[in-house]
Amino acid sequence: MSVTTDRSRAVNTAAADLPPVSAGTRRAGRRSGRRVVAGLLLVLATVVTFWQVDLRRHADEQFLAVARDVPAGQVITDADVRVVRVANPSGLDLVPAERRGGIVGRSAAVPLAAGSLLVSAQVGPAAWPAAGQAVIAVPVKPGRAPTSLTAGSRVVVLVAPPNGGGQQAPQQNNGVRRAVATVVSVAAGADQVGTQLVTVLLAADAAEAVAAAPGDVSLVQLGPSQ
């Protein structure tokens, strides 16, 4: 019994030595947590305000956009560009509207697509197609290309020999010319109703082989990851 009593007294003595948690200490802890939350909300409000002000400031800026398709190397006319208001918070090298007079009369370095914003690097000496690449136009008969082809589509160009030997699998190397290309433009052909004239960008050596191959052209559209 004496051992148990001594232990109880020791425990009670240790508990008595601990400083009591006062109400003021609890209130101080709550105030500290509130200050942290208030500080985070203030930082967030500052960031949102800065973003809104910056967006309004850039939204008032005017830049040049392409009004209609312009082939690479063609001189840009006043009707080829138009003025748009657009936010440019990412700092792209867009052409300001006040530089319109310096753009008109110069050549397009690359093909300009209608509706796109004009970038300074797209104006100047023709730099397209790049070294090692070439552009060719291939006539495609009805039913030999998807109707969904647009500029930018990736395709496989297949040219089958006129004797019909190309109807077998292309992997058998039976005379079928095959090349991967990117569609530049699609226009209606003049020779036959439903025929398309598809301009494609591909490797220079493949372009020569496709252009020299006799036979009908078929286009197979590829997915974005192929």
Image (cartoon, rainbow, N blue to C red):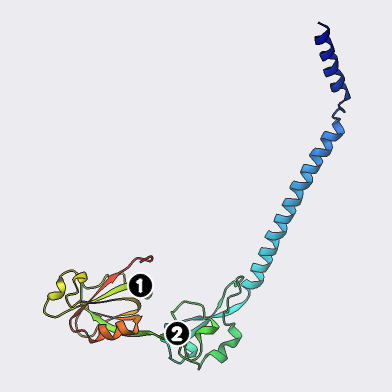
Q: What residue do we see at 45% from left, 90% from top?
A: 126
Q: What residue do we see at 61% from left, 74% from top?
A: 91
Disc 1 packing (10 Å; few <14; some 14–19; many ≥20) = some
Q: What residue do we see at 15% from left, 71% from top?
A: 167
Q: Position of residue 2 (x, y in %)?
A: 83, 7
The residue tagged 1 is: 153
Disc 2 packing (10 Å; few <14; some 14–19; many ≥20) = many
Q: What residue do we see at 72% from left, 59% from top?
A: 46
Amino acid type at image mark 2: Val
Q: Position of residue 107 (x, y in %)?
A: 47, 91
Say left or right for 87 vs 211: right
- Residue 147 seen in this snapshot: no
The residue tagged 2 is: 110
Q: Which sits earlier in the primary sequence, circle 2 or circle 1?
A: 2
Say left or right for 75 vs 203: right
Q: Residue furthest top?
A: 1
